[in-house]
Image (tube, coloured by chain):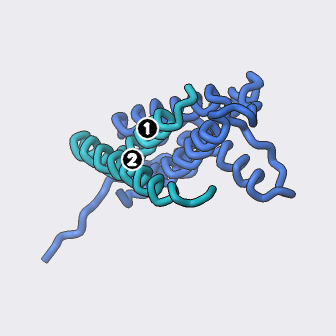
Amino acid sequence: MATPVTRPTTSTSPYLICAAAWAVPGAGHIWLGRGQKGFALLGILTVMFALGLWIEGRLFPFEFADPLVGLAALANVGIGLPYVVAKALGAGVGRAVAASYEYGNTFVIVAGLLNMLAVLDAFDIAQGRK
Amino acid sequence: MTSHLGLMLVFAALVSAAFAVLSREEVREQALFALRLFGAFIGAAYVLGWLLYPLPL
């Protein structure tokens, strides 16, 4: 008969960990003692976001009259503080005629979506599910 | 950097690494999974590219 596996949980609120994980990519995993995963996510997602901006990707405005633009804006925000910093620096204007414009958009959007996935993963770890 | 192939390779590498880190625990498992996923990304891109080649897009 198999014995149930007990996984350690944290006393910190999982929602606080999720907030940290959203704000700084990988911070949730680092907080939960998974430093290797956390620092890897920090590097990968930050590089992906910065590269997307560098190759002239755009940070989309919250205009839900065009649903795809609004959804792209939500995905952009998923990366957390790097989004705030980029906005503050005036980055992410996007140049639609650039050859790499669509690639840039894809990099920036996917970086945000992957960070949302990392937030969910951190939540599962905090709940003792992983 | 405007090479479509180069950007696709960088994108595939970064997404593969992120998925591998999230879905595997051990570093060795992560590396193997990332390599397999990267190969699948590139293979799928080539197959789709050739399938779309005859279409008048």
> Which of marks 1 and 2 precedes in the sequence?
1
Looking at the picture, how far across and down is residue A55, in whole percent? Answer: 62, 29
Residue B15, above or below A49: below
Which residue position is annotated with label 2? B42
For the residue carrying disc 1, how many other residues have a C-alpha within 10 Å: few (<14), some (14-19), or many (20+)? some
Name the foreground residue: A79 vs A101.
A101
In the displayed structure image, the side of residue A120 where residue B29 appears, left or right = left
Looking at the picture, how far across and down is residue A63, in whole percent? Answer: 84, 51
Secondary structure type for disc 1: helix
Give me the C-alpha separation between circle 2 and circle 1.
7 Å
Which subunit holds the residue at mark 2? B
Chain that the image shows in blue? A
Residue depicted at 36% across the width and 34% down the height: A35
Name the foreground residue: A62 vs A105.
A105
- Residue A97 figure quarter: top right
Q: Identify the image quadrant of the C terminus of chain A.
A: bottom left
Kind of residue at disc 2: Ile
Residue depicted at 38% across the width and 41% down the height: B17
Name the foreground residue: B10 vs A89.
B10
